[in-house]
Each structure stands twice: as structure tokens, then as C-alpha cells.
Image (tube, rainbow, N blue to C red):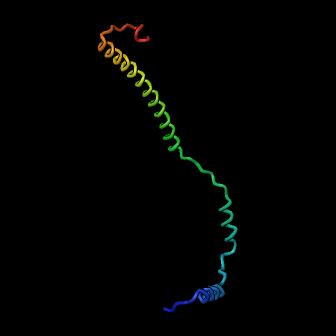
Amino acid sequence: MKKFTPQENIQRTMESLDRLQRIQTPPGLYEKVMAKVNKPTVKVIPLHRRWQVAAAAVLLVINTFSLSFYVKQNSNTGQDNYYEALAEDYSVSLTTETMGY
């Protein structure tokens, strides 16, 4: 295989470009392509996908309320247990006034 100099490579490339011919396309092809490119497309979300999103949102709301209710219930009892354990360690009696209620 013969090695060509950069100048020879440029010359060979230019000669090959000179031999190129324009291809013939069917009449009206450009107009058809441009009509499809410029045609506005409307993205329609399928009905089942909308129901899935709505159901997920409802489940998220229910889970949020359930979690907040659960945390409130457990945080109050945990706090009471903490105060009771602390009072027991220091031999102090607890009343609602001393617990801040």
C-alpha cells in the first residue's frame, strides 16, 4: 500500500469530489418532508396513564396523613415514657403540671 503525502491526499479527495453527481429524487419529496417536519404534533396522554398518576397521588396523600398520624401517636407515648423513666431514676413523682401538659 502506497503512502501518500498530505498534499496528494488533498488532491485525491478533491478529484473524488469532482466525480460526484447529484442524485435524482422523486418530484415533491422535499415538500412532503418539510410538511411532516413542520406539522404540529399533539402529545396525548393515554387515559390509563392519567388514572395511574391520579391513583399514585391519592396513595401518596393517604400515606402522608397516615405517617404523620403514626408519628404523632408514637412521639407522645415515647415522650411520656422518657419522662417517666427520668422521673423514676431521680425518684420524682410526675403530674400533668410537671410534664408540661
Comparing 74 with 101, the one in front is: 101
Corner quadrant of residue 63: top left
Comparing 96 with 18, the one in front is: 96
Is residue 44 shown above or below 96? below
Is residue 86 shown above or below 55? above
In this rendering, the count of numbered labels is 0
Left or right for 48, reference 14 = left
The residue shown at (32%, 9%) is 92
Q: Residue furthest bottom?
A: 2
Residue 66 in percent (x, y) is at 43, 27
The residue shown at (40%, 25%) is 70
Is residue 10 shown above or below 75? below
Residue 35 in percent (x, y) is at 68, 63
Residue 82 in percent (x, y) is at 35, 18
Q: Quadrant of the C terminus?
A: top left
Residue 50 in percent (x, y) is at 53, 42
Comparing 75 with 48, the one in front is: 75
Corner quadrant of residue 39: bottom right
Left or right for 92, reference 48 = left
The residue shown at (44%, 26%) is 68
The residue shown at (30%, 10%) is 91
